Amino acid sequence: MAEEQSFKAKRAQRIQALSAIEEDVASLLRAAGNSISALSSNPPSESNSTDPTEARKAAFTTNATAYFKLFSRIQSALQTESEALQDEGLIPAKAADARPVVIEKGDPSTNKADDVITAGGLGNLDIGWLNSRGDEVGRRKEEEVWKEAREMLEGIKERKGNTHNGDVEMDNADIEDGI
């Protein structure tokens, strides 16, 4: 019972540490956004300087410095938490050390190779095959756009008549009417 309470206390401590890191990530993103904003055409709102360029430089420097300090702190904290989780045996030190998860179907001693989750649950799915089919929507949309363009040009051609051996002279008004 005491061991279970100790495990729960360690788990709660790790969750609190990760929650603090999450807050730092939000601050990191805020500092990055403020740095980018200082470089944009919108001047910083809190400038005491009469020179907007100097105010932007100061805002950028302040936010960039905060960004890199936060980044370093987050990186260190994540490394510390990762090592703590490895030391406690909650995560393996290397991906190669990870044991496959066995789906228990009845008696675990009778599990077959097919009952093991591999590749993070993807099994024998070939990611290259999946990615090669990922552009189907893009190809369909491209076909639709070409079809609409062809129909628009054919409509302009019909209105102008076929007087130039299949060529149609177009001006901006024709294109705007077709759109």
Image: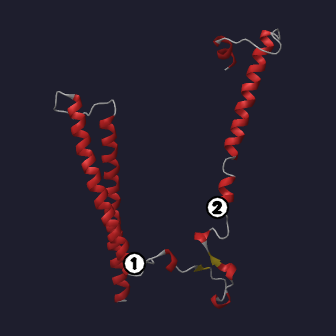
Q: Tell which circle, 1 or 2, labels the residue nearer the N-terminal end.
A: 1
Say few, some or many: other residues with alpha carbon within 10 Å of mark 1 (under 14 / 14 to 19 / 20 or more). Answer: some
Q: Quadrant of residue 166?
A: top right
Q: CA distance from mark 1 to mark 2?
A: 29 Å
Residue shown at the point (31%, 52%) measured from the top left:
27
1 or 2: mark nearer the eye: 2
Task: Check disc 1 and report the residue beneath it.
Answer: 86
Rendered view: 87 above or below 119? below
Q: Quadrant of residue 157?
A: top right
Is residue 69 rendered to the left or right of residue 151? Answer: left
Name the amino acid type tagged 1: Gln
Rendered view: 111 above or below 13? below
The label on residue 127 is 2
Pinpoint residue 149: horizontal percent, then vertical percent. Answer: 72, 26
Residue shown at the point (74%, 20%) measured from the top left:
153
Residue shown at the point (51%, 77%) measured from the top left:
96
Q: Quadrant of residue 179?
A: top right
Name the amino acid type tagged 2: Ile
Q: Which residue is at the far front? A: 165
Residue shown at the point (34%, 53%) measured from the top left:
26
Q: Which residue is at the far bottom? A: 109
Rendered view: 122 above or below 161? below
